[in-house]
Amino acid sequence: MRERLLQSCAGNAICIVEAAKKLVESNEADEETVKLAGSMLGQPSRKSGVFLSRYLDVFSRLVQKHCSVMGEREYCIYSWNPRVPIRYFPVGIDATGTILAFDKSGIPRLVSYPVSRTLDIEGHGVSIPNVSENPVVEISKRADGYQVSFYFNPDLKRWIPSTRYLLHNMRYEGRNLIIADSAEDIINPYALIADRIAEEAGLYEKLSGWEGRTVNFILLLEEPATVRPNVDLASPERCKLLLLNYRDESGRLSSISEAVKELMWEHVVESEKVRLDSKEELYSLIEKARQSLEHRSHFLRFERGEPQRPLVIEVKSKLYAEAMNVKYMSDPKSYIILISEGKREEALGLLVDYEPIKQAALKLAEHYTALETLVDRLAEGLGAGESIIERLLKGLQDVGAVGENGNKVSTLRSELERARRTKNTRRLARVLALAVLGETMIEAEEGVSKLVSAIKAVLQSQDNKERSKNETAAL
């Protein structure tokens, strides 16, 4: 029974669990089947009661399920609850838009098995394998868009796009889930754009004969997903559908190059290096990925002999989101962060070609360079006691850099105290600058200019006080 379940569900953890639940409820499940399903939930046990309790917890709290009747079946899509931190057990890894179809018997049929969740390299319990034993066999760069998977719907008798959270005939309006009156209607806005691109570009003809597979794409809108563009304003003519990979009938997840070779479709960026088995090369790549301004993430696929749920580790850039905020929104906060990370010229190059913004940004960069120098001097005086902290806060209030009350004052006092203990002047300079920024680049330039003037005044006062003290002692 265990092997039959694995084969019928193509290794998909959610399908295995739902099928096992039906067998348990009808008293047809043996202990090995219960244990297998429990392991998919992250809690292996041969006891049916333990399995059902864990099932209820996972599917009521961690995994969300949305269903719609189409023809003779009910189609349900499973996704991880976005309000809950991800946990890396098999059901969680497969909760990325898996779609099951249930007939009157209640036995699930796997109809869409999208790409599994990748493991965040910073995530709890995630470790990097020994590449001499498990080499990296694929390196890809994240296209900053939205997952769209195509599968053949046996009731609608056509290829259908779905997203990570919703079926094609679903959409959110605020927090309300709307389901179309007709199962054939595509109202999911991302699926609708993908469907139009697929229709006009001839994708459906290319997919003929691929029934039983799930083909995964990334939908790119006119602006990257990280800046949250309004999908309802997007035009299909200005969007792209990039091929990622596919799953075959056995559940095996293809590589990007394999999918491209078979489907001949524009694809996501893949590294030219096919195999990476040097620890030094790996850690060098990871460090570069963390500093990337061009790509949101890098994905490293390791050879581990698991074709259905391969180990893919995601290395997120710490600066990409800031770069996109500068490029598309001229955000001063993100601009300051990039400058503080030594990316001044790159940040300037990202800005919109509008002279008032560029001039303000140039002045802001100059003010920040001056601020870093002043903060080094300021840190030396922080050890003298709390009085310089209070004088600095008063100086900032006098020039209007911060108000007399509020969170900014509390934050600044806390950071100044921290700097006195740790001597981390780089962090202090950034926190001080971020505390006085306005909404626009021009307002930010004015705010940091006032901040620099206030610190100069405090340092000058401190110098005068020391000079007077020394002169008195000399007398």
Image: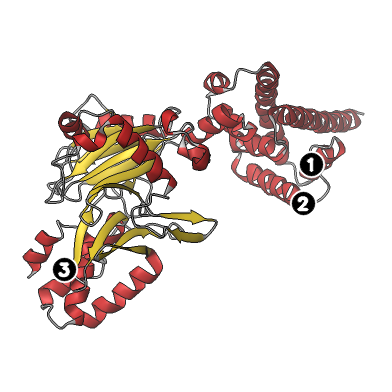
Q: Residue at x 66, y 43 (%)?
A: 420
Q: Quadrant of the N terminus?
A: bottom left
Amino acid beneath label 1: Val
**x, y percent for residue 63:** 36, 63
**Number of the label disc, if any, that sits on residue 378:** none
**x, y percent for residue 190:** 41, 44
SS at circle 2: loop
Q: Quadrant of the C terminus?
A: top right
Q: How many marks?
A: 3
Q: Which residue is mark 3?
A: 36
**x, y percent for residue 9:** 15, 60
**Number of the label disc, if any, that sits on residue 402:** 1
Of callouts 3 and 2, the N-terminal one = 3
Q: Nearer the viewer, residue 350 or 397?
A: 350
Q: Which residue is mark 2?
A: 406
Q: Is residue 55 above or below residue 392?
A: below
Q: Is residue 432 above or below residue 156?
A: above
Q: Quadrant of residue 279?
A: top left
User: For the residues marked 3 and 2, what is the alpha-carbon distance in whole angstroms?
Assistant: 55 Å
Of callouts 1 and 3, the N-terminal one = 3
